[in-house]
Image (spheres, helix red, strand yellow):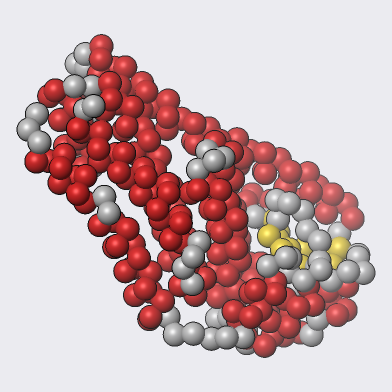
């Protein structure tokens, strides 16, 4: 076995197996959801790059393999001239790497297009049955059950049911609207599409399986934190309670939903951000140290 395949193999195991196992058991990820989302996103990128490098390194041998390892570790990309001068074996390795990268990329684009079509259809229905309220800067839909949700992307809009307008206080409604606008401003639909695409391409991979459920929850908590800049904890928590049973399209972000109870408990239990961040960084550093022996071994073996 080509020893230059050890670093991508170690990074694939680290990002695809070990880090997800640590993340789903870590409390700090929900206390600082933006850091947790960053770790999930970086893990996905590292796994995709490692999975692309691994078959390329298995095909190559000798100097070509060593050059690829050096370029990958220093993040150097080949020049167009170097690409034109590649040998047949190097072209095969390059094609394998591109093919592996194409799988999650195509899945991401497909998921974006599917969700966009669904949101546009729903936006068309809203234009027919809803009415825009300039005071709320939202579309009001006649429905007795309290619900607040948003459609991100090009058809961005916030939707409020008449039941929510009648049930929620002014402060609670403002908190729910701030939560939904945080989803739109943060372009959270892109991360959801990436997580769903990864889960579709690598269904048995712990990174994809756990990330498919963890990422949407962390996005809701991130939107909660951003909404708390404009509203009180009590207003947001009671709004979530009132909206917990509200319905929303699959492609939308809803202020309530099945995660409302967990998020209410988190909102009403304030924490200091410093210690969770330190615990998170320590977890990441400990996981990264696990792959260091493979990289050292690769660099210490000649050829």
Q: Residue furthest top?
A: 88
Query: Is 83 on the left or on the right of 166, as rendered?
Result: left
Q: Is residue 40 visible?
A: no
Vertical arrangement, residue 47 with respect to residue 5, above or below? below
- Residue at the image position 23 percent from the left and 22 percent from the top: 60
The quarter of the picture where the N terminus appears is top left
Identify which residue, 155 or 295, lies in the foreground: 295
Counting the numbered discs, the total is 0
Vertical arrangement, residue 3 with respect to residue 205, above or below? above
Q: Estimate the x, y position of residue 221 in percent, counting from the top left.
A: 58, 70
Identify which residue, 226 or 39, lies in the foreground: 39
- Residue at the image position 73 percent from the left and 51 percent from the top: 250
Q: Quadrant of residue 275?
A: bottom left
Q: Estimate the x, y position of residue 187 in percent, counting from the top left.
A: 55, 56
Q: Estimate the x, y position of residue 189 in percent, counting from the top left.
A: 59, 53
Q: Is residue 56 visible?
A: yes
Q: Quadrant of residue 297?
A: top left
- Residue at the image position 81 percent from the left and 66 percent from the top: 246
- Residue at the image position 32 percent from the left and 45 percent from the top: 11
Vertical arrangement, residue 73 with respect to residue 212, above or below? above
The quarter of the picture where the C terminus appears is top left
Q: Quadrant of residue 256?
A: bottom right
Identify which residue, 169 or 70, lies in the foreground: 70
Q: Estimate the x, y position of residue 93 in percent, counting from the top left.
A: 30, 21
């Amino acid at each position: 076995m080509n020893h230059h395949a050890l670093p991508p193999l170690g990074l694939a195991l680290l990002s695809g197996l070990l880090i997800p196992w640590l993340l789903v058991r870590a409390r700090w990820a929900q206390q600082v959801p933006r850091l947790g989302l960053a770790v999930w996103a970086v893990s996905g990128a590292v796994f995709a790059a490692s999975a692309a490098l691994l078959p390329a390194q298995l095909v190559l041998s000798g100097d070509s393999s060593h050059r690829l390892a050096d370029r990958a570790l220093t993040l150097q990309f080949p020049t167009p001239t170097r690409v034109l001068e590649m040998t047949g074996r190097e072209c095969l390795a390059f094609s394998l790497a591109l093919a592996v990268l194409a799988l999650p990329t195509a899945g991401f684009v497909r998921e974006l297009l599917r969700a966009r079509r669904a949101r546009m259809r729903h936006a068309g229905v809203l234009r027919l049955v809803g009415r825009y309220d300039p005071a709320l800067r939202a579309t009001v839909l006649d429905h007795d059950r309290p619900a607040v949700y948003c459609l991100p992307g090009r058809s961005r809009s916030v939707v409020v049911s008449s039941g929510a307008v009648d049930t929620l206080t002014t402060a609670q409604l403002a908190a729910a609207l701030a939560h939904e606008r945080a989803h739109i401003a943060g372009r959270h639909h892109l991360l959801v599409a990436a997580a769903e695409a990864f889960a579709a391409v690598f269904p048995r991979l712990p990174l994809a399986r756990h990330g498919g459920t963890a990422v949407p929850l962390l996005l809701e908590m991130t939107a909660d934190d951003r909404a708390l800049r404009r509203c009180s904890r009590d207003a947001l928590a009671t709004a979530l309670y009132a909206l917990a049973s509200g319905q929303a399209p699959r492609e939308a972000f809803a202020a309530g939903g099945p995660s409302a109870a967990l998020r209410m408990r988190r909102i009403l239990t304030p924490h200091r951000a410093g210690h969770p961040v330190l615990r998170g960084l320590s977890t990441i550093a400990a996981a990264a140290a696990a792959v260091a022996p493979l990289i050292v071994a690769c660099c210490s073996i000649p050829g």
